[in-house]
Image: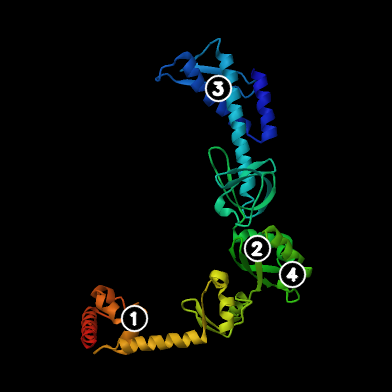
Amino acid sequence: MSSELLAILDHIERERGINKDVLIQAVESAMVSAVKKVVGAKTSENIRVTIDRADGKIHAYIDEAEIKSVDFGRIAAQTAKQVIIQKIREAEKDVIFHEFSAKVGDIVSGTVYRFDKGNIIIDLLGKAEGLMPKREQSPRDDFRQGQRVRAYVLDVKREAKGPQIILSRTSPLFVKKLFELEVPEIFEGIVEVRSISREAGERTKIAVWSKDEKVDCVGACVGMRGSRVKDIVTELQGEKIDIIRWSDDLREYITAALSPAKITEIRLDKANQRAQVIVAEDQLSLAIGKHGQNVRLASRLISWDLDIRTREEIVQEKEVAKKARQEMMLDGVGEKIVAALIEAGFDSLEKIKDATVEQLTQAKGVGDKKAEKIIAAAKERLSKQDESA
């Protein structure tokens, strides 16, 4: 048993990369518990087990007296076997954890192994199993058991059963990584992906920029006759992809992000990172997109709030606001206070009448006493209107 144990430990150290001393210490520790059960040791007694690193002989002691038992060899063999199996499993889990932790942010391939309550378990080439939660699956995906799958490694977590590898096909970074794999100019760093926004299964907008003026960033991503982007669209089961030229000129960038709609004018509010985008009537639905998708993706791409309006809407809104201000003009209340009240959401006399002093003071320039006067004036005005009606 002695020489055989050392030979086994040496083999495991070479094949599995587990330090032999770590294994020996684990076997010693486990055998202490096993020996206690066999000899019925009292809790006050000190039991220790040692394995000679030179010849592999095992010795057990109660205090300083060595234990001599016919069962000792059998206990040693069983315990060593259990510990070695456990350590091998732990080592394999560590290897998988470290291997796939290094792949977070990369794309991996596998095959659909099984389905579990809407989640997909993917066999990663026999090395490990990946979990693709339902929320990380594109609405366009319809996989079958045994089908080949590519997915983005989102996270790797340590679990009692082994590493849990979380995969995604909905992450915008999945699309970004696909472009890196399909477009050599991106992989080489000549073309950069500056921003990306996505609604999985529907549409993706990706903003690209070229370090080299001679390289057309959009053309590089599209490829000859659209070959490169077609391969990505195929991988995404037909999801639409808008490739946009990034620009440090914000108006130019917004215009590109909202394509194919034609923009008439852009008014920037840099302090609040908002832009009012004016379009012709026939371009409004195109700029907003189906269910607001185009403007929503453009806003995320640029990280600005985009407000799409036609000139007719702006004129109409101004007229409505002007009328509201006129109706709200009360004795002792100036235009600035009225504008502040409207901005705070109190855009009618009814809302002012029903407001508390505390609520009204949320408007800029309105104190407690002023709020009381405004509420009283609003009630008086509405009372007179009721009488006249």
**Residue pointed to by mark 3:** 50
Amino acid at dot 3: Thr
On screen, residue 268 above or below 176: below
Image quadrant occupied by the C terminus: bottom left
**Residue pointed to by mark 2:** 239
Spatial separation of the CA atoms under disc 3 and disc 4: 67 Å
Q: Are marks 2 and 4 in contact (CB under 8 Å)?
A: no
Give the class, few, some or many, for how many residues have Cα within 10 Å of label 1's Cα (few <14, many ≥20): some
Amino acid at dot 1: Asp
* Viewer can see residue 365: no
State the mark number for residue 290: none
Which residue occupies 21% across, 83% down?
383
Q: Secondary structure at mark 3?
A: strand
Give the class, few, some or many, for how many residues have Cα within 10 Å of label 3's Cα (few <14, many ≥20): some
Between 277 and 117, the residue placed more toward the observer is 117
Spatial separation of the CA atoms under disc 1 and disc 4: 52 Å
On screen, residue 2 above or below 222: above
**Closer to viewer: mark 1 or mark 3:** 1
**Closer to viewer: mark 3 or mark 2:** 2
Residue 146: image location, x then y, percent? 69, 44
* Viewer can see residue 163: yes
**Residue pointed to by mark 1:** 347
Q: Secondary structure at mark 2?
A: loop
Give the class, few, some or many, for how many residues have Cα within 10 Å of label 2's Cα (few <14, many ≥20): some
Say whether disc 1 or disc 4 marks the residue closer to the N-terminus. Answer: 4
Amino acid at dot 4: Ala
**Residue pointed to by mark 4:** 220
Say whether disc 3 or disc 2 marks the residue closer to the N-terminus. Answer: 3
Spatial separation of the CA atoms under disc 3 and disc 2: 64 Å
